[in-house]
Amino acid sequence: MVADHREDAAAGEPEFVSGPALILRSLAADPGRPAVVTADGVRIASGEFAAATYRLAHELIARGATRGTTVTLLTGNTAEALGARYAAGLAGARLVTLYDGMSAPVLAEITASVDTAVLLVDAERYASAAELLPLVDVPAVLTLGPGPDSGVAIGEDVLAASAGRPAEPPDVRIRPEDDHGIRHTGGTTGIPKGIVGLHGPYRGIFDVPLGSGGADGPPRLLAATSLAHLAGVLADLTLQRGGTVVLQRSFDPGAVLAAVERERITDLWVLPPLLHQLLDHPAIGRTDLSSLRQILYGGSAASPTRTREALKVFGPILFGLYGMSEAQLIAVLTPPEHARIGQDGRVPVGRPVPGVEVAIRSLDGADLPTGDQGEIHVRSEVVMAGYWKRPDLTDAVLHDGWLNTGDVGYFDEDGYLYLSDRVKDLIIVVGGHVHPSEVEDLLVTHPAVARCAVFGVRDAQEGEHVHVAVVPAPGQRPGLDELRAFVTARKGRIYAPEVLHLVDEIPLTPVGKPDKRRLREAAAG
């Protein structure tokens, strides 16, 4: 994990250079290059961005945000949020980001649970702050800018306060075993779990060849999904590698396509449901996509049909990623390997990346042979340290360095990993188990189905029934009998949906995955 092998004069040992320090060194070394383009089109040079970030780090330290304390961000996709991410890391504080789309009571519980010392709020989340602040007791609440015009007091402008601080790195020694941050799960099953990440594993991401660049010029990343998730990690890599991050407030398929053409975007990260929205947008055929070098996708099951369609539209630039907050990157499917999609109708998530061991095991922990489905277990140096203040949950998934991911999958004879489903998403029906992703992959091949989500709903006797929410294809209105017959003929009776819900859109969680809890609640109501 050690990137810089200069000798530490005091300790006589190689210096550990943290991820935030690497990013800021790169920015400061080339002050004239464009670093960030905001959602409003403002362009910020690397030197300006680095100086503001260093000053903010010094200000946070002066206010007590040091090793062992928590800086929590209530921020959107802004340059100020990016700067705050790095400033907290430079100060030695652990970082927590409060996701958009979660209720104020849930955000309040997270804020309290992580022992927030400083809460930073940017202009995108002032309205959220008005709902959150009455529910929390935080030592310091500060705004990343002048604050709202509404007259509602939130806190002092920390950027203005930091203007007189040094525009140079703070003298804080970060250790690999220090907390880098706490990332929370998507929250689809109650209060999210906090996943503790350390600086050592975080530093390791800079050695992973994600994102484009090199001989073809510096990367230009479009961050159209939340910086709290993989878009933020990719932004970190892009800035460290001499590139530019173009921000959008949220994912809008038309705006994404326009930005790709206007900003000559090279790198784009999407979850499969968002990739499908791009493919279905009427502007896709008239947008200049020639600048794109990599489209990274993952985070939920990928449809073979829609993935093949994406390959035709975008070309051989798709990279499938399989990972999770608890284990970082686990496997990658490169563009040439997408040719395997046609062999058995499923999309592999790729081969395990170097340094990651993957085992398929039965419920009793026994290793399973090639081709057999079981729970996916992972071991590597970057597996999480544990769940924040939840040793019970940590002990349930971590054993002898192995993490039980909760995913179901199998290896083929060539060493490619395939996912079947989340263990908790299995639908237990009379006659067997239904993996929702298998039914979803089939239904999107029906000409009347644009997008869908399959989920189980329990009845009063605790029996489960297969439901499907369908976004119809333009001009179509599929019926339940039609879809049941389609599924039965191809997979069998137990897979056929019992209830059909026609919807305008599939609801998504704050991390961009199909929100099956909301679908279940709507079906039950």
Image (cartoon, rainbow, N blue to C red):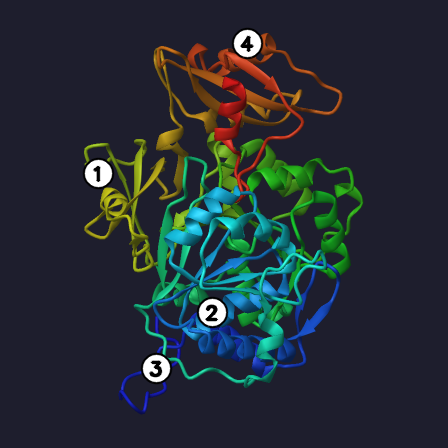
Task: Say which amino acid is labelled 2.
Answer: Ala
The CA span between labels 2 and 4 is 56 Å
User: Which SS class for mark 1?
Assistant: loop
* Discs 1/2, front: 2
On-image quarter of the N terminus: bottom left
Among the two numbered marks 2 and 3 on one chain, the one whose residue lies closer to the N terminus: 3
Question: Are the two marked residues, 4 and 1, in contact with CB atoms closer than 8 angstroms?
Answer: no
The spot of residue 385 in percent (x, y) is 29, 57
User: Which SS class for mark 4?
Assistant: helix
* Discs 4/3, front: 3
Q: Residue at x 57, y 23 (%)?
A: 469
Residue corresponding to mark 2 = 88
Above or below, comparing residue 510 to residue 247 in the picture: above
Residue corresponding to mark 1 = 367
* Discs 2/3, front: 2
The CA span between labels 4 and 3 is 64 Å
- The label on residue 15 is 3
Residue corresponding to mark 4 = 485
- How many neighbours does mark 1 have within 10 angstroms: few (below 14), some (14-19), or many (20 or more)? some
- How many neighbours does mark 3 have within 10 angstroms: few (below 14), some (14-19), or many (20 or more)? some
The spot of residue 273 in percent (x, y) is 58, 37
